[in-house]
Image (spheres, rainbow, N blue to C red):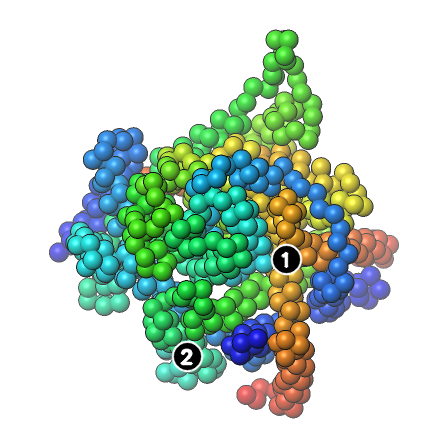
Amino acid sequence: MPFETVLGAWVATGLTLFIFTFLYQDNPLFKLAEHLYVGVSVGYTIVKVYDTVIVRLLYEPMVKQGDWSLLIPLGIGMLMLARYVPKIAWLSRIAFAFIVGVGSGLAIPRVISSYILKQVEDTVRPLVSLASEGGPTFTYNLLDPASNLNALVLLIGVVSVLFYFFFSVEHTGPVRVAARTGILFLMIAFGAAFGYTVMARMSLLIGRFTDLIEFADPRYGRASLWLLVATVATLIVSSARRREQPPGGG
Amino acid sequence: MIYLRRQLPLLITFVMGVVFAGQYYVPHPRSELMLTEVTKWLQIIGGFALVLGVTSLFHLHAVKIRRREPGWGYSIVLYAGMLGTIAIGLWVNGKESVNGAMTAFGWIYSNMMVPLQGTMFAILAFFIASAAYRSFRARSREAALLLIAAIIVMMGRVPLGEMLLPVSGDLTQWILNVLNTSVRRAILIGVSLGAVALSLKIIFGIERAYLGGGRE
Amino acid sequence: MTFAERMLHIDRRIIFLVIAVCTLLPLLYPVGLAIKVSPEVRGVHDYLESLPEGSVFLLSMDFDPASKPELHPQAVALLRHAFKKNLRVIGMTLWVTGTGLADLVFSQVAQEMGKVNGKDYAFLGWSPGVGALIITMGQDLYKAFPSDYYNQPTRELAVLKGIQSLRDVNYVVSLAAGTAGIESWYVFGKDKYKFELGGGCTGVIAPGLYPLLRSGQINGLIGGLRGAAEYEALIGRKGRAVAGMDAQSATHFAIIMLVILCNVFYLFTRTSRGQSGQPRG
């Protein structure tokens, strides 16, 4: 196995374990990894912006294809960076005004079409369907999301939740019934969201543990095992030192 | 000068907002050409905005180092990580791989950034378990309903749960497809109405917070 | 302090240990429980399967390393399926910090399936702007990406021959870890440019995407690691997602047990407080 791959495995394992030490208590190993993470992420983003925006979107089209109209966005982008110079910081407002103005204009019709009209359209479906003989029928299959019963439940859910959130009248009488129904729907949806969040977080842990197991292989010099021992030893020494220090010291 | 500093940005927002909201309904070739050009500009300006966002960290940590505040050593680690990544990234022209071979920049990404960010989020698995044990209690009927729904979904989305309680899979599907959808749809409609209202307030100069600081 | 109260206040590190053991053991000693495929995942798979050879498939990997364990297996499975079907594949990402992952997935799977960059697939990399980028792609792909990730002019790539904008793309799948993903592809893309759209996402955002699925705005949804495992089962190439399903089962059951225990202890403390006349907590 190439040296850089093995070295990479050791570095990745070490940093993974450093972050995991936070589960025991906050400590210098975690802080080191945390700050390194922020630094590397910011550095990475800056390099990608340079490569993509400056080189691929500005320099090459301007110099190789002669598209000098790109000086306009370059100018507006530079205005944005004027925020760093207090005397001319107000110039950045022009850039923000451009972005926010175009962004709002683009968003309004698209959001109305995609999220409001399409969602309302799918909510107000016919509650009774036509059977093959031509007469009206009502389908009860709960497992079919398109059944009439589910269409009715969905309609009740959407209306009652909207009632609960948006009607600022006092919740009494029929409004109270609607709002209470809305709360029940909300609770079930929050429960489902919690279940899915648990699923997501556990998947992330599985991913990291899978890597650690892979790096415990002799091909990688058993990086996970050696570094686990070293990290635990460091934590023990660090805890012992902390206990030795008088309260308030350091 | 006051006009340039205060009124001009509001005028630009208004004109741009009205023009590009209207453009959606005017699919004339010239109107489409304008859309292509301006969204391309917006794409480029978005890159500058990203730099502006991430570099706000510089100042914070520079002050920490200058004043030798507690933990300033970690700020040096942050700077070293950032400058090292930038130097190596620029050296290899910002590419993680060339002809299928990983570059030094790609090595930093794969062996430092990926495990660091991945683990930072993976430890949340432990905290969500701890929080579930400490606070997920059936104190009321509503809380009990939330709890039951969560348990059904947790069972219905894993093979062991579907094996032990086969109905949990179908129940999960129903909860997600019907009950969850109705709530999410109501929220989506509400949030979208709010977003449209906010966009209109921005275009008409009622909402000005985005103009931020800088001297008048 | 009663036994129940003591149990309610146990050191959280014991809970951490339980979760760690429940994750580690099934990974070391897998059982291989059967995986049932949901209609949402089948929606994406069947549409991709129905595309004729040479159709254009755009995979947007809109995530970063934080969501790698959930979305990386989805990307691998989708790419294997698309390459096996001999589709023309375009790759990209809306997330700057996801560029490296997307590049790695594309080059590894392409190499494994014997596909050539520029001829069988194109990797466009990242570009800023999200909504603006998608609109520009819908108007003119070559304006949005004058060159690909490797700085080759996109107009000269054989794989992009005949493609002018998103209107010429047959199927777009966004693997999303946030709003800059499936939702953006619908609002700024499909709404106007009318391509077919499918999605893959993390477990956290999956419930929020069901309204789009039900209204037909997306034709399928691969949710989290479980969704990836279903897709792997569908294409008959078991990978990391299927391998992780036993651990997923074990950890879910650990959490369910913790929640049940917590409520049992809570009930005990309430009963004992009620009997001793203390106010209920």
The residue at the point 61 percent across, 76 percent down is A220
What's the distance in space between the residues labelled 1 and 2, CA to CA?
34 Å
Neighbor class of circle 1 (other Cα within 10 Å; few <14, some 14-19, many 20+) is: many
Q: Amino acid at mark 1?
A: Arg
Residue extending furthest toward the left? B1
Q: Is residue C248 left or right of residue B186?
A: right
Residue that numbered label 2 is attached to: B80
Helix, strand or loop at label 2? It is: helix
Q: Residue A68, located in which quarter of the rendered image?
A: bottom left
Quarter containing the N terminus of chain B: bottom left
Neighbor class of circle 2 (other Cα within 10 Å; few <14, some 14-19, many 20+) is: some
Q: Amino acid at mark 2?
A: Ala
Q: Is residue C157 left or right of residue C31?
A: left
Q: Which mark is residue C240?
A: 1
Disc 1 vs disc 2: Cβ atoms closer than 8 Å?
A: no
Q: Which of C234/C244 is in front?
A: C234
Is residue B213 visible to the viewer in this orientation of the structure?
no
Q: Position of residue B35 (x, y in %)?
A: 26, 41
Identify the chain of the residue marked 2, using the numbered disc in the image. Answer: B
Q: Is residue A101 left or right of residue C2?
A: left
The residue at the point 19 percent across, 67 percent down is A87
Q: Position of residue B67 (x, y in %)?
A: 38, 83
Above or below, C105 relative to B202: below
Q: Which label lies toward us, 1 or 2?
A: 1
